[in-house]
Amino acid sequence: GASGARILVTLIGALKKNGGKRGIASLCIGGGEATAMAIETA
């Protein structure tokens, strides 16, 4: 699905709204595995 994209876009929106510079989006992909993405706004 698009849950990863939704989580990332929500994080970017929250950073812009609150004046944040850095954030981490993480997602469980089942079977004990996970993925994460660190972003930094300009």
Image (cartoon, grey):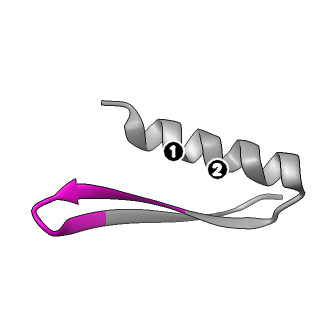
Which circle marks residue 25 in the picture? none
Q: Is residue 27 magenta?
A: yes
**Quadrant where the N terminus is found in the figure:** top left
Q: Is residue 32 magenta?
A: yes
**Proximity of marks 1 and 2: CB atoms separated by less than 8 Å:** yes
Element type at mark 2 = helix
Assess disc 1: are there few (<14), some (14-19) or many (≥20) residues with their C-alpha within 10 Å of its C-alpha. Answer: some
Q: Main secondary structure of the magenta part?
A: strand
Q: Is residue 4 left or right of residue 16?
A: left
Q: Amino acid at mark 2?
A: Leu
Q: Is residue 30 left or right of residue 14?
A: left
Which residue does the numbered mark 1 point to in the structure image?
7
Residue under the image location 73 percent in, 42 percent down: 13
Task: Tell me where residue 23 appears, x and y as whole percent.
Answer: 65, 65
Residue under the image location 38 percent in, 31 percent down: 2
Direction top: furthest residue: 1
Q: Quadrant of residue 31?
A: bottom left
Task: Tell me where residue 7 appears, x and y as whole percent.
Answer: 51, 44
Position of residue 5 relative to residue 29, above or below, is above
Q: Is residue 16 left or right of residue 22?
A: right
Q: Amino acid at mark 1?
A: Ile
Q: Magenta residues?
A: 25-34
Which residue does the numbered mark 2 point to in the structure image?
11
Residue under the image location 62 percent in, 42 percent down: 10
Position of residue 8 relative to residue 30, above or below, is above
Residue under the image location 61 percent in, 40 percent down: 9
Direction right: furthest residue: 19
Task: Tell me where residue 12 appears, x and y as whole percent.
Answer: 69, 47
Assess disc 2: are there few (<14), some (14-19) or many (≥20) residues with their C-alpha within 10 Å of its C-alpha. Answer: some
Query: Distance between the Cα atoms at labels 1 and 2?
Result: 6 Å
**Quadrant where the C terminus is found in the figure:** bottom right
Element type at mark 1 = helix
